[in-house]
Amino acid sequence: MLQGKMALITVLVLGLLGGYIAYAGEANIMVMPSEIKWTDGPASLPPGAKIAVIEGDLSKAVPFTFRLKMPANYKIAPHWHPAIEHVTVVSGTFYFGAGDTYDMAKAKAFPAGSIMVMPATHTMFGWAEATADETVIQVHGVGPWGITYVNSADDPRKK
């Protein structure tokens, strides 16, 4: 009886993961740090950031993974995303706060190794540590990825 339940659970888990694993295509995605290809950040973010898309197409409803490299004191105004985001601080310190206003006193410092999960449409803001040369975060989720600023005047696409 227990073996039958375990077999059913195994089939269900593999069935659920199969679609996700299949997205990677015929080969695994394995990238060494020296192989990461950095480009200028998207127009939806303030100038100065670099992005490296590791997996997926950010404009499509598919799994994605990207890294964002921010110079010291780089700020992202209050905003929200249309889908859940999982963020890992790879290097440096990222300050994160929740809410519609940029209130540094309400933010918390997240050093390398920290993980944050932000639900869809929850407002947030953040900045990179001022004393580090750069801060790198890794973001993953299921697209399409997007950003909507609380105050449209903060949107770099409108400047």
Image (tube, grey):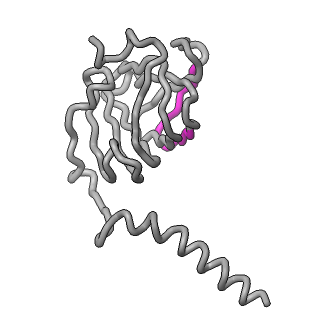
- The correct choice, above or below, for 125 with respect to 12 in the image is above
- The correct choice, above or below, for 153 with respect to 11 in the image is above
Quadrant in which the N terminus is drawn: bottom right
Which residue is at 34% across, 36% downward?
A: 68
Residue 143: x and y in percent read: 42, 45
Nearest to the observer: residue 32 or residue 10: 10
- The correct choice, above or below, for 56 with respect to 102 in the image is below
In the picture provided, is 88 more to the left or to the right than 130? right
In the picture provided, is 4 more to the left or to the right than 82? right
Tell whether position 59 is magenta: no
- The correct choice, above or below, for 29 with respect to 72 in the image is below
Residue 78: x and y in percent read: 48, 18
Quadrant in which the C terminus is drawn: top left
Tell whether position 115 is magenta: yes
Which residue is at 56% across, 16% downward?
A: 100
Which residue is at 37% across, 32% downward?
A: 135
Residue 67: x and y in percent read: 34, 42
Which residue is at 27% across, 51% downward?
A: 33
Nearest to the observer: residue 131 or residue 138: 138
In the picture provided, is 149 more to the left or to the right than 66? right
Q: Residue 118 is drawn in which quadrant?
A: top right
In the picture provided, is 3 more to the left or to the right than 30? right
Q: Main secondary structure of the magenta part?
A: strand
Q: Which residue lies furthest to the right in this view?
A: 1
Q: Residue 25 is drawn in which quadrant?
A: bottom left
Q: What stretch is highlighted in magenta?
A: 107-117
Count of numbered circles on the image:
0
